[in-house]
Amino acid sequence: MSQVLVKDVLLRIYLYPHIWIYAHFMVQRELYMFLLNYFETNSRILGGLCGFPRILDIIQQFYWDRPKGRQAFGSKPLLHPLTKEIIGERPNPEEIGKIRLLLLSLAEMVLRQHVSISDVITLAAFLDKSDDLLCVEDVLHMVLRLLSHKHFLTNFLENINALGGCQMFINLLKRQPEVIRLQGLQVLGRLLIGIPTEKKGIRFFALGGSSAKYVLENQWREKLKLEIIFVVIADRLLTFPFSDSVRATLFDVLLGGASPKQVLRKVHHEELQSDKKNSANGPSAHFALPQILQVLFKFMLNCEDFETREQILRDLQKLLEANPSNIDCLISEHGWQAWFLSLLSDVQFKKHHIIDVHDSNATKVNETMLIRSIFCVVHCHCIFSVKGGWRHVEQTVNLLLLHLEQGQLSRRVLMNELLDDLIQGLIDIASKQNILTVQPCRDNTLYLLTLLDETLIRDTLSSLPFPRSILSEALVDDISSSEGYNAFGALESLGPNELSDDDPSGISDGRAVKKSSSINQLRGWQQCSSQNEVVMDDHHWHLYDKVWTLVSEMNGKGPSKRSVTSASTGPSLGQRARGLVESLNMPAVEMATAVVSGGLSAVANISTSKLVDKAIRLRGEKCPRILFRLVLLYLCKADLERASRCVQQFVSLLPFLLSADNEQIKNRLQLFIWSLLDARAQVGSQDDGARIHVISHLIRETVKYGKSMLAMSIADRDNLEDPSSSLSEAGSVNSLLQKDRVVAAVKDETNYIKSSIEERLKQVQELRLELDEISSLEQQQKKAFEDELQSNLSMIFSSDGKRRSASRLTYDEDQQSVADKWCHMFRELTDERGPWSATPFPNNALTWWKLDRTEDPYRRRLKLKRNYNFDEHLCNPPCTCATGDSEASKHTDDLLSSERGHVLGEVKSFLLKGLRGISEEEILDLPSNEDDEPSNADSTSSEINASLHPNIEQVDHTEDKGDNGISQNRQDHTSSYSVTGEDEVLLSVSCILVTPKRKIAGHLDLMKNSLHFYAEFVVEGTGGSRIFNSSGGLNYPNNPEAGHTEKAAKPKTCKSVVRTNIDSEKGNPMERLDPVQQRAFSGKQPKDVKRHRRWDLCKVKAVHWTRYLLQYTAIEIFFINSISPVFMNFGSHKRSKEVGRQIVSLRNEALFPKSSTKNRDEIIHFVDKRLAIEMAESARDVWRRREISNFEYLMILNTLAGRSYNDLTQYPVFPWVLADYTSQNLDFNKSTTFRDLSKPVGALDPKRFEVFEERYCNFCDPDIPRFYYGSHYSSMGSVLFYLLRLEPFTTFHRNLQGGRFDHADRLFQSIEGTYANCLSNTSDVKELIPEFFYMPESLVNSNQYHLGIKQDGEPLGDVVLPRWAKDSPEEFIFKNREALESEYVSSNLHHWIDLIFGCKQRGKPAVEAANVFYHLTYEGAVDLEAIDDPLQRDAVEDQIANFGQTPIQLFRKKHPKRGLPMPIARPLYYAPGSITLTSVVSAGFQEPAAIVFVGVMESTVALVSQGLIMSVKMWLTSQLQTGGNFTFSSSQEPFFGIGSDLSIPRKIGGPLAENLELGTQCFATLQVRSSSFLLSCGNWDNSFRVISLNDGRMVQSIRQHKDLVSCVSVAMDGSIVVTGSHDTTVMVWEVTSSTRIVNKKVRDVQNIPDRIRKDHILSDKPCHILCGHDDVVTCVAVCVELDLVVSGSKDSSCILHTLWQGRYVRSIYHPNGSALSKMVVSRHGRLVLYSNDDLNLLLYSINGKLLATSETNGRINCMELSSCGEFLVCSGDKGQIILRSMHSLEIVSRYDAMGKVILSLSVTPEDCFLVGTQDGSLLVYSLETPQQRKSSLLQNIKSRTFATG
């Protein structure tokens, strides 16, 4: 089966839910199951056939759970259109849900193949805006399934990134149903987890990696920006209560993808405990999104259920213990310590408290213990494994100190407990593995000891002894006089200068704490410490004991020995640098550079100089300060046992501690010994003197191990004296001490204490500022996030609105097309030639007609078409219409009943079923071409419409907010078909479509291959600048704010687009419009407006930049194939020019791609003002050479001057050419017969001109320039005056007159009276319009309107014609046109052109010619944009629109006169007698045979004999001899003749059918590029064939008719072939080539082999199959210029169809009922019929009027038209060639054929006749040359001499 057909079936039937929505559930289920199975095996066609947006739209419109908006289908049952019985119901909600899941499976299949930005936009818009919660839930389930596929996730994230990030889904967390919130949270989590690391930028939020990296101070602000989404997530979720499902989902997101139930089981304590090892190795135990923890903690903080909080903490603890990488993820989050600390209350808890289970605080204590345990796990991991992990411990201490500063004393206890837990954890691990000696654990432990030292100083500093005398001398006057050394006092006593000089930490910088603030805080801490002095209980001693154990582990077995070695040798420079890199996590390159350039001293100058300095100092300290302080604390405060154990531990460490030899150790050793002596003096007497022995032992051991240092330091021993010493060894010890070293050590200790405390204060203060800044920045970021979110969502909604609007517009357009096709199908079936006609042809039924806007190449509109919307009330007097409505209605009903009496009920039901779903306005507006605009409902459509619409539900018509977006690129269709790249909107602009009937505001979309206009509202008034706003959008009526701003390649506002909905069509169409639409169409009939119009860019012939209301803001687009031009007005000059150029560019690119090798001669250019003037000058030269007629030239000038049929305010203008409307006959040889073309109409009558001249001379106004004539020669009123009797101008006239005809005496009555009025009336100076030269129907009241009664009592009917017209409108038009083309007018027309289009139009020449009109009729007379007052602007625009506009000036110089006529160029027109028989040639057949066909193509003559022998000869003309164009000059005599054979005669075709009447109708010639072909029919196999004239081979054989093909015809331009058959049908074929066939959308073109397709000349399928005949089709003709296909038949009728649409126009019945034998149709609108039965010629107009008849007195075998179409050449058995006029069939000339029977005839473009005779001779008739005349004269003389002799 053809793939195209399969796609159409799938798209138009299976995926068209309008058909299925009311079907049974099982039917729909099987349907979508079939589609799923089919697309599973044919997945490649799914994406292009049905995209995700369309599936989602189908769900919203048809398979909803909660209907909302006018787009929801099926809320009410389907009713029968006639009986109103229920014939279908939508499945129940449960079944709908199942179908919806099937559709989502289809959508999932589509998205797995490819996900685009439009898919993401559609999804985001749906999830955010849809109120159908079950649909949202189902879609989220589908999305979650898809996110588990890596390929989809990658593509999905790329598209999300392009749209602003995954926060577009965050509003799902605001949904009321919990299940949607949880699904939304899972979607967000999976998106955030799935973001690739390399793409985590500002829109993708930084996630924790496998190894923890501390966020430095210059990074946390940036990271806060990235992680603000989690703050917003928490805020969204916190508006709803906490539940187990929320907890489970948060863990699901944290762990990265398990279902909530699995997570609940996973984090359950017992299962996790049992599977601890497995879970640690599995991916489910890893923190995939640690940032979600802050959401979890915010929930816990607001959760009042402490058991839930406890459970969460237990789960977290187990997860952290199970997988160390989880700890890395946790510590990578900034402020993680605050999350835990925020859960604690202000009550002080201790680990050794007894917990009462009945106590309300028991659960809080458990929670505190869990938090401590988590801190212990995390801190231990940081110390053991993380480089720089000590900083996390320090940050925890800082946070606790910050709370301590705020008076929360429990934090102080908690801090000690956390340190206790940490040290215990370190000891436990160190006991199992020697980890404290390796990096990074060793450096982290050293830093930890400094933190412990600070804690020890803070808790016990006031209790430690120091020698007062030494301090006094060291600190001079600033040392406190208290008994013990008070560090806080010492610090406070230091002067400002000392504090500044000794401040190594940069406290004085901009961000540091001020000095006074530091001192105040120190004082506060001192007071706090003194008032709440720490009691040294067992808890403290346990902590200090653990510290000793930790130090022992660090300096136990092995390390002490290694320390001695390293003390002697020392690490190398490289080793020390590498150690710093490892411990400080500094970039190696940076460190190496610093070391190489300046040694280790240079390291202090890099970015982390403080940390480097501190690391070097800590590693260099063999004896940490905390050890001396602990020893003194134990000796002074601990019990004797603890003190003794401490001394033992310390003594064991002394060899290592005193192994270093530097000044600092020496000074510190002396201070320590001095402190021991002081302590022995103070506390030695305790414990019955036992303590003094412990202290003395320590002194001895210290002196022992430090003897070398002390011996080297002995000096000035007389200066050292301790008066408090009473021991005998005091003198010996004192002898080892030096005062200066002790003082230096005291100063060093003082500075250390001061810097440590102030550094801590600084960090705490910075932390406070940082937290405040974070809080402030978080609020700012949240606001910025919300703003960006709204901006992104607005963009998404706008884009989705564009898509849905485009989808609805496409559906609306599709429905309009369907309605059009249905109605025309109905008309074809029921019209007079239809198979179900109620009034079979011929009949006397009344038929009404109106003008067909089809234009021929000369821009004539010659045809009428049937008016199905005619208002019969207009045929009656107004009083009858007013009082006799019921009678008129009854008459109509009776007529309707009689017309439909023969229509079968079944047929009617079938038609109604097909028409169901089509909106009322579309049924009533069913034009015969794309430009049709109906006015009222016809009786047929009314009857259909009365029973058309079933009682389908009326859904909520509330305007969908999503429809207010801008429509750009049409990406998907709701109900029709997918959009390809050719349908992408490249430019969308607001504009006004100007038509004769109305002006319609809307939008024009420029696509690759087409133009699409869709209506917004009908414009009231002139439709000038007030319709557009400042940005170029539309100002909607009563709603100017709703204007549309267009954007290139972006879509458009669809707020007022009229949408069609199958399920909501009952009722008044106005009720189906949005409020804006109702205002826009207020007072109008929206049913009359054709919503969508589309034009093929490849058919664009020209684009002109033109004026509207005298402003260059419009373009007019001209097309080929008789398509009427399109006139559009835009908001500005620039925009109109831009659109015009773009259309031209797209057209040229579509026809001639850059890679194409086609001849580019047909490339067009945008016709702006400059090019229009150049084209006018070129046309002028052609006219002067008489290559075009006067009429053609005037139409060209009108077109270039901006005169348009579309705009009645600037209609084409033609001159009055005759002045004699009273004579019986016209004499074109008299000048008085003609009007003076050198004067304007106002100056033709001298008496009236005197009035004008006097007014001009006496007129004086400061604002208005002088003028002769107040009215104009061309205005809308004058156009409607002339065309009153021709629809649709009749309707226009009535609309202009308020819905009725003007008074009869003021209407167009007679030609003579109108011309006389133009000469005498001072307010009437109008010229004529083109219709006076080609349209006789405009002069006849053919529709029998009641135009009124004149004052003389006579009713007004047809226009009264001059006497010389013989009461024939055709005669009048013929004479008027003949006058226009006469020599007098040709010689004087240039004067009139000067007045209208040339130099006398404006300026001084215009004044001299008395050709000055009111100033507002001229371009540039007023600047509309400068008029600010809208009322004044409207008034000016109204005056311009209604009172005439002067055409664009095309010529600045005087127009030249036309050249002299050249009779020899048109011999049939000027001298038909000059045509004579010039030669007789043999056909060249082997045996004499009748020539049944003669065809001429350029230089070739094709002959076909009775026996189907084809001979091809050369046609010799003067053109070939000279090589130039066909012209004659005095030096060249014309020559025509038959040359030699181009090929040998050969047999063509096969056997002919027996019943075939072989004749000229069976053959035709065709020229395709440089090749020539012969078409032949009548073959026995019902085919017709294409035969090459070059070699005689058969190129193509087409067999589509069901019976014998009896006749064939080819259009003059060779683009169309028409065939008729015995099967009573006519087929239309397009001439094409192989490449065009492949590119065209021919259904089965894929199945045609290349070897067959490559030589095809005609399309494989006919364009149209035309029906209507009841018997054999005997003759056919085609006229591309008139868009007509004409066929004659043995049924005595001739049928006219439109060529491009294939629609029935009319039938002409032979008056005598004779079978038609031959016919010709002229491009001038004349049709000649001939029948062999009565031997009469019948001349008809193409509008069906019989114009003339003529007897032939013999059988005619052939008849042809001359090249100009004005003469008929026919011949037959009589042996004569008759030349007849196509105006009246009068014989113009006769040509003798020597008595031969003529069977075939051809007329060449040079007006030569080639005649084929029965005896096989070929006669050539052409112009007689002088040689021939001389020879003929000699022969005549000889014959006369012979006769006399």
Image (cartoon, grey):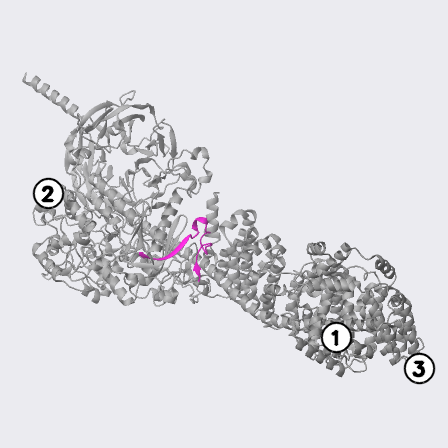
User: What residue sits right under mark 2 in the picture?
Assistant: 1228
User: What residue sits right under mark 1 in the picture?
Assistant: 414
Instruction: Report whether 1234 appears left or right of 610.
Output: left
Out of 67 and 1679, give the one closest to the viewer: 1679
Q: How far is mark 3 from mark 2, CA to CA?
A: 159 Å
In the rendered structure, does residue 990 fall within the stretch colored magenta?
A: yes
Q: Secondary structure at mark 1?
A: helix
Where is residue 988? Give x, y as percent.
40, 55
Mark positioned earlier in the residue sequence (2 or 1): 1
Check contact, mark 3 vs mark 1: CB within 8 A: no
Where is residue 1055? Give x, y as percent.
40, 63
Out of 1448 and 842, give the one closest to the viewer: 1448
**How many neighbours does mark 2 have within 10 angstroms: few (below 14), some (14-19), or many (20 or more)?**
some
Q: How far is mark 2 from mark 1, CA to CA?
A: 124 Å
Out of 833 and 882, give the one closest to the viewer: 882
Residue range in magenta is 965-993
Check disc 1 and give the amino acid type.
Leu
In the rendered structure, does residue 657 fall within the stretch colored magenta?
A: no
Q: Quadrant of the C terminus?
A: top left
The quadrant holding residue 1415 is bottom left
Where is residue 326? Give x, y as percent.
71, 62
